[in-house]
Amino acid sequence: MRIKACRKAHFNAAHRLYRSDWSDEKNAEIFGKCSNPHYHGHNYELIVALTGEIDPETGYLIDLKILKDHIKTEVEDYMDHKNLNEEVEEFKKLNPTVENIAVVIFNRLRAKLDTKYDIEITLYETPRNFVIYKGE
């Protein structure tokens, strides 16, 4: 029997959407306020969903404390209260759009979790703007 188990998390981070190979004018045209050279921040809401088979011995898909601990180290400790462009290695060369942030989170968690789980990342940048990434 397949089931999905989810864990919610939260982190705050600043970023600037910007391409160094574009002029300031083009960055402003494409990214608008999000290209502010002094950065801007978001209160990100994260949902990590794992799908797989229920273990007949434990009744768990996964002990959610394990997932909680991975989210803490791989996302919260890594990104919370950081300037993503300057302090998070992946974004030194990758534009920290909500789409790219979700992919980075997926990849960091995929490296820690058993491949028997399908992973789905839902990342809210604002209460109305969010992305979903399943590694596809």
Image: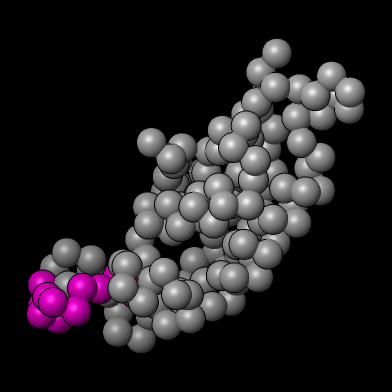
Residue 65 versus residue 69 in the image, above or below: above
Towards the viewer: 119 or 128: 119
Position of residue 14 in the picture relative to residue 33 (left or right): right
Q: Residue furthest right?
A: 57
Image coordinates of residue 24 in percent, x first then y, are 14, 81
Residue 54 versus residue 100 in the image, above or below: above
Q: Judge whether residue 127 can be spotted in this image.
A: no
Position of residue 119 in the picture relative to residue 95 (left or right): right
Instruction: Check the image and tell me how it is coloured.
Output: one colour
Towards the viewer: 18 or 66: 66
Q: State yes or no: residue 25 in magenta.
A: yes
Image quarter of residue 61: top right
Which residue is at a point 81% across and 48% down the rendered structure image? Answer: 65
Which residue is at a point 13% across and 77% down the rendered structure image? Answer: 21
Q: Judge whether residue 60 can be spotted in this image.
A: yes
Which residue is at a point 77% across and 48% down the rendered structure image? Answer: 66
Task: Give the quadrant of the C terminus.
Answer: top left
- Which segment did they paint magenta? 16-26
Residue 2 versus residue 99 in the image, above or below: above
Mark count: 0
Image coordinates of residue 63 in percent, x first then y, are 81, 40
Task: Give the quadrant of the N terminus.
Answer: top right
Position of residue 133 in the picture relative to residue 44 (left or right): left
**Magenta stretch: dominant secondary structure:** loop
Which residue is at a point 43% across and 52% down the rendered structure image? Answer: 103
Image quarter of residue 28: bottom left
Q: State yes or no: residue 17 in magenta.
A: yes
Q: Residue furthest top?
A: 1
Towards the viewer: 5 or 45: 5
Residue 67 versus residue 52 in the image, above or below: below
Image coordinates of residue 118 in percent, x first then y, are 56, 33
